[in-house]
Amino acid sequence: MVQRLLYVMGSNPALNRVLMLLDEGSFQQILAGAEQHGADMPRKPGDGVLAGFGRVGGREVAVAAHDPTFAGGSLGEVGLRKLAKLYEFAMKFGVPIILLADSSGARFQEGARSLLAVGELIRTANEAHGKIPQINVIIGGGVGGAAFTAAVGDIVVGVGKTGYMFLHGPRAVKHALGQDVSVMELGSVKSLAETSGMIHFVVEEESEAISLVKTLLTYLPSNNREPPPSKPSSAQTVKQTSETSHMKTLINEIVDQNTFLEFQRNYAKNIVTGLGRVDGLVVGVVANEPAVNKGYIDVKACIKASQFIEMCSNFNIPLLTIVDTPGFEPGVVSEHNGIVREGTRIYRAYINADVPKITLLAGQAYGGAFIAMCSKGIGADYVFALPDAEVAVQPLEISAELLFRRQLESLPVEERASALEQYVQELRKTARGEALLKSGVADGIISRENAKKQISAVLHRLYAQYVNYYLKK
């Protein structure tokens, strides 16, 4: 009753947010009375951190919220260790953890003690990585240790109007570099979503963030020993954006209507990642986006895809990869930015993922990028190809120029273009359709109209075996 009264009165933002997230009457605090003992330190029961357990849609979760009204929203030793204890409990009982962040960083009055406690929290959050889903919501500040904790987690949701995240605030920047910058210039969640990809989802209001967390939980298992929640395909609804493309249209033809939840929409737009359902079964989608930079895979796309693949593997979510790319991004800048090193991350993520992996070849699939996008060579369980999918070492025009160089040079200049096109068409016969079946690149050629039915049948069969073999041991 007291908690409900505080919520209605709005006198405690942390409690307000926790109760907005949880099922009514389900919140149980831990260490509610813990506080600092030093006479010269800010003191309040809970030490600026509200933490405990509750239910979301009937499922048990761990939840914590920073109190921005106490000590400037700073995090002290007691509050930080309370957070670490919550992570330990969440791991022990196998439940997701949600952190509602609104903090100004470590409490400088406590000096090294608060820094050590930050380290303990980051270590504990890292231990939880891959064992339980970690969702961080940046409502206000996510500064210093709170930023690192978010980075260790799986999903970060940012509130566009008020959220920001960084390691060094404006005063530190002014001291170190002599530059005057605002909080939002440094780390607004909107800018981070576009530049670093640190923020997976941006919404405008707190209420939208809470609603999104509830939706995310319907796609995620409670821990790495369980499958994702089973739900009839007709029961899932995700607000869709007006933004569309050929690839996103294809994705939405395969997944159940209004179930595709796109991750990092504004980061590395040349690759699409997200969760959806195929006839009710949760699936992680990774797809090249040829509408952006022709679908070339650059360094940012490698980072985005590999992190998403690893999350799906950690939480028993099967993978559907849709391929339409001319290759890894060429050029001096790409090479110097480490495309070889970062491209290896995609290889490693797919190779290490032990969930069912289905691939649909939907367009171009050239060179090392074809291999990296979950080819049979690195462990795809089943590969479909659309009739016009094309697999080759490099674009066929380049191959034709090399293979038929002498023939082309012997022709008058005005005839070379048409001759080159004829040679390309000859090579195309070895890169499409039946040729892909004969070479073992694909298991089946399917029409776009029949793609969902075919993919769903294989996906459900493989996942049933995965659950029986891996998750019921």
Image (spheres, rainbow, N blue to C red):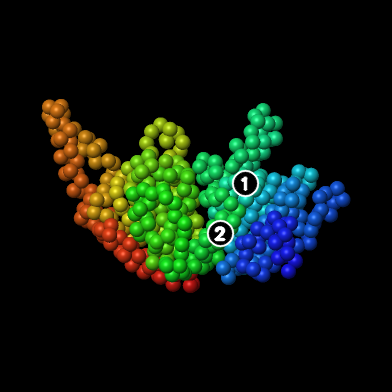
Can residue 470 be seen here?
no
**Is residue 283 found left or right of 169 in the rendered image?**
left
Percent position (x, y) of residue 346? 43, 49
**Is residue 376 found left or right of 432 in the rendered image?**
right
Residue 101 lies, with reference to residue 259, above or below; the image says above
* Rendered residue at 45%/44% (across/down): 268
Percent position (x, y) of residue 310? 48, 55
Farthest right residue in view:
39
- Earlier in the chain: of badge 2 and badge 1, it is 1
* Rendered residue at 43%/44% (across/down): 269
Residue 99 lies, with reference to residue 419, above or below; the image says below
The numbered disc on residue 162 is 1
Which of these two is toward me, 22 or 114? 22
Which of these two is toward me, 52 or 37? 52
Percent position (x, y) of residue 124? 64, 56
Which of these two is toward me, 424 or 236? 236
* Rendered residue at 16%/31% (across/down): 416
Kindly check if marks 2 and 1 are in contact, taking CB atoms under 8 A apart as contact: no
Residue position for label 2:
211
* Rendered residue at 71%/50% (across/down): 68
Q: Callout 2 environment at 10 Å: few (<14), some (14 to 19), or many (20+)?
A: few
Label 2, secondary structure: give it. Answer: helix
Q: Determine the image quadrant of residue 98.
A: bottom right
- Number of on-image labels: 2
